[in-house]
Image (spheres, coloured by chain):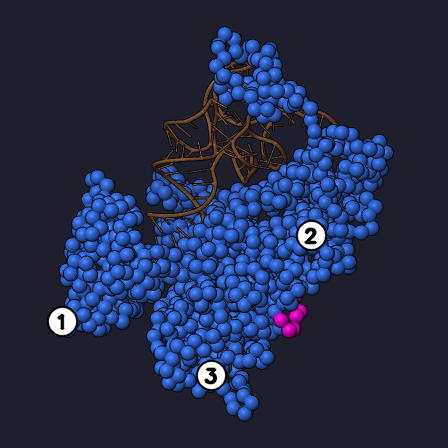
Chain colours: A blue, B brown
Amino acid sequence: MFKSWIRANNRQICFFLISQAIMDYNFKEIEKNAQKKWVDEDSYRVSNDSPLPKYYVLDMFPYPSGAGLHVGHPLGYIASDIFSRFKRLKGFNVLHPMGWDAFGLPAEQYAIQTGQHPAITTKNNIDRYKSQMNMLGLSYDWSREYKTSDPAFYKWTQWIFLKLFKSWYNNKTKKAEPIENLISKFEESGTTGIHAACGEEMNFSADEWKAFNEKKKSDVLFNYRLAYLSEAWVNWCPQLGTVLANDEVKDGVSERGGYPVERKLMPQWSLRITAYAERLLNGLDTIDWSESMKEAQRNWIGRSEGSSLEFKVEGGKYKVSVFTTRPDTVFGVTFITLAPENELVGKITTADRKDAVEEYVKTAKNKTERERQTEVKKVSGEFTGAYAIHPFTGKEIPVWVGDYVLAGYGTGAVMGVPAHDSRDHAFAKHFGLDIPIVIEAPEGWDILKESYDGKTGKCINSGFLNGLDVKDAIKLAIEEIENRGLGKGKVNFRLRDAAFGRQRYWGEPIPIYYKNGIPTPMDESELPLELPPIDKFQPTETGDPPLARATDWKYKDKDGKEYHYEYTTMPGWAGSSWYYLRYMDPNNANEFASKDAINYWQNIDLYIGGAEHATGHLLYFRFWTKFLFDYGLVPFEEPAKKLVNQGMIQGVSSFVYKLRTVCEEKRENDNPKIIRPNLDIEVFIPEEIYKQISTKERLPDRLDEELIDFCTNKFKQLYPTHKLISCYIIGVQVLRVDISLVKDDFLNIPGFKKMYPAFKNAFFFPNEENYKCGHEVEKMSKSKYNVVTPDDVIAQYGTDTMRMYEMFLGPLEMSKPWSTQGISGVYNFLRKFWKLFYTSGQLSVVSGQPEEFFVSDEGPTATELKVLHKTIKKIEEDIERLSFNTAVSAFMICLNELIELKCNKREILEPLVICLSPFAPHIAEELWSKLGHSSSVLKASYPKFEEKYLIENTFSYPVSFNGKTRFMLELPLNLSKEEIEKQVLASEDAQKWVKDATIKKVIVVPNKIVNIVV
RNA sequence: GCCCUGGUGGUGGAAUUGGUAGACACGCAGGACUUAAAAUCCUGUAUUCAUUGCGAAUGUGCGGGUUCAAGUCCCGCCCGGGGUACCA
């Protein structure tokens, strides 16, 4: 319909376009010119050598995926860009770089499927991302660009890894130190007096140390190194063929791809992030991050205070050590539970329980993570047959094994206090164990039904703890435990060391080779260890990682001897843990960044990115920064002073509903047999009817009949030669449909049939006019067919509109579904703003000629100055608090007022162009140059706000009675409280409202409000 | 379950320190211009009642409370979003 209209009106439209072209806002031309100018003048290049104060604004490192950017990605990029541009106008030297997190699984999965080298895939994806970013007018200094897969970059990732490898964490000095220090301590006095972060507590003398052979020494040191190799339980993902870190596993499946994850014991490189647990936790108090983000990290680190406590197992041959945060409930212990993986299980199990326990341990260990998690509610366990002695009561208590106890946390054993721990309670109830109460529960609490886990109340039935409050009891219990040598007060963390090796090709090689079976670091001077070419991106036949395929990839020492390298590579997060430092000095071949550069740029002032990185990247990059700080390599402990998480822009997915039908047919010759032909008709029903079917289970008879008639008729129409008896509806299939085919929930049916040829003969009930789809708000993703790219929006409205509209949508941190409703408001704003420079706000029809650019040099009025300075102030404040949506409104208000005033004066408009330039840089650049400036608006200064233009001498007081506003009263500003009260009460309006009521009280807040209480 | 968030017109949202709730924009309705449409401009637009005008009452998820005054603070619920989960 629209097309035919265009044809009919073609001549008119052409005329319209020509006559409007000169004065109208032609964003295509404007944006092309401005971007060309910035490239030609290299406008975004930033120097490390500047007298100006620095400011560092960073976007989170993107992993360039094959799908390109969708409209959700730019939200953060635009916000940081506006902020950077603003800071530049305010006289800062702003570092605002961009680069690529280029190693990672998707490119490698693609390589496995297609054989295309991940480097090629990655490059293509980067090119696409970069062109989209440039289209958005982002002010990155591309001269600082790099990707993590460049050897020149990963040389330094490897360098930091070696540094971690050669370090241990001294809990006395609370920092990382060279491993040589530890070795010399071992040589002097063995482990005595050493307080180190380690895997397990070790005890040996100096002589013993010296007697260790080389292999043993290496093994011992791995117990202390910050990058270490150990036999460990890992998250193994068979489909991806690699291990995953804890934060890469969600709900028992891999975060990328959603494949099941198993637990597997294997040799594994890890980073000892747990050594930094306390500092990672405390550091949170020093940074300006959102409370939810800090909370997420706090929970992930999971600090808990408590005590260790030893229980002698019958005979005294073995001891079970448990960790508890509730030593005050020790008198309520009725059993002990060991994790299935706990070594003691095999040792203490009695002969008669052996078979059952072994069977149980085996099944528990073989469970996948998923099974373990879904079966959380199911209680399971076995009695080992052994008894422990209660250290305070001397009573015998049974030792059980149960998979609700985790091997990796605490000591892998818990004391069962069923009355005051819900998990112990479930266990005791299931196996019929005693539930004695030892903390007074609130009135009416049925301890047999539910445990009382609360941390308030008094101890009862608890020997020396009787009568004490929980808090005091915990203190005293720990004291007593320590006095008796049964254990000591202890802090435990939930945080685990981070698995660092990946059985994968597309990552940084780990610069380690194996000399006589001993993992040996390469020398720093030999870096980078480059990724070798290989023939296939899959594991070898013997199950080694892909790198083992590389021929002639061997470490050669001076004597010409060859050793094989480590075959695993680093995980995706290795490069991103320090990448922000490289931007400061990206081409430095001698250091990861020069001291001067680091000292000048310091840490990130504003970091913007998604909240999904809370427990991954954001923790690792704090960890690496602290490590580098310990060696004096960076002068700060926290990488990012301020962090803002932009909300997710969700997609709106559309659905169509296909009836599942069965048609029965009668054939002449088969008479009277009824057959079901292998023919089908596709009938789609609108959302409204689907809802009725899905919620009511049965349709109203009339509608049901109608549908069947419809199907039957359509079948006849499609297969006229078949003798149909009838159609039955057996169900509804919900199908996703690409949102490009849907507008306001209405389906474009010709387009649909074209895009999905399988449905080219489909029918729509009741007719093809106005078929309404269902919709749902979901994450924007290719697989959900709900992706909107910025490209389309920009083509239609231009970059400046796109930028301002994304900001106008709402607060930066808030998530919201994408919708273009309202984009015309922003577009109109820019057009009207443009017109202000052409028509002085009036429609000039006098000449009948296209208007020309014109601004008046006449001096501004007080009102005009007030509008300007109000806006200058508001925009500045809003940008500083990242409230970009209100800033956009402020521009609109300002424009409305200027149009009202018919103001086109240079002294007003010129400063406004500068204010607008961070938001809509292209139109600002064009107007700036039209205003006669030869240099770019990027080099301008943000206009100075002058309070004097805003000074008023009256204030319009809202006068309220009992809190309800009744009328306004304009009064001079300089009145005293008493005078205000007097004038208000004397006013006619007040008299009307007071009538004969008595005034109890009058509240006057100068320049705010007057409230009269009657 | 626990932790963190949020809940305001038909819609997106504003109200920054307890002080005029609904800025700004979309949408919608009416009008001007036009042969007509588009575009543009003007007017109105929380709800209910009243309507000739003046107006009145209600109103920020629900129920209480503090206060001269509560979207904002306190207590108890309900709902949505995110994180996390046998972490002893």
Q: Quadrant of residue A378?
A: bottom left
Q: Is A585 in front, or is A629? A: A629
Residue most extreme to the top:
A996
- Secondary structure under tag 3 reads strand
Q: Residue at x 52, y 85 (%)?
A: A554
Asked if residue A124 is positioned above or below residue A861 in the image, the reply reads: below
**Secondary structure mostly seen in the magenta stretch:** loop
Q: Residues within 10 Å of mark 2 (few under 14, many from 20)?
A: some
Is A868 placed above or below A409 here? above
* Pointer 3 chain: A
x and y, in percent, of residue A523 in the image: 55, 80
- Residue A352's label in the rendered image is 1
- Secondary element type, mark 1: helix
Span colored in magenta: A584-591
Mark 2 or mark 1, which is nearer the start of the sequence?
A: 2
The residue carrying mark 3 is A514
Tag 1 or tag 3, which sits nearer the N-term? 1
User: Residue A490: image x %, image y %?
Assistant: 34, 60
In the picture of the structure, the residue carrying the numbered disc 2 is A92
Residue A127 picture quarter? bottom right
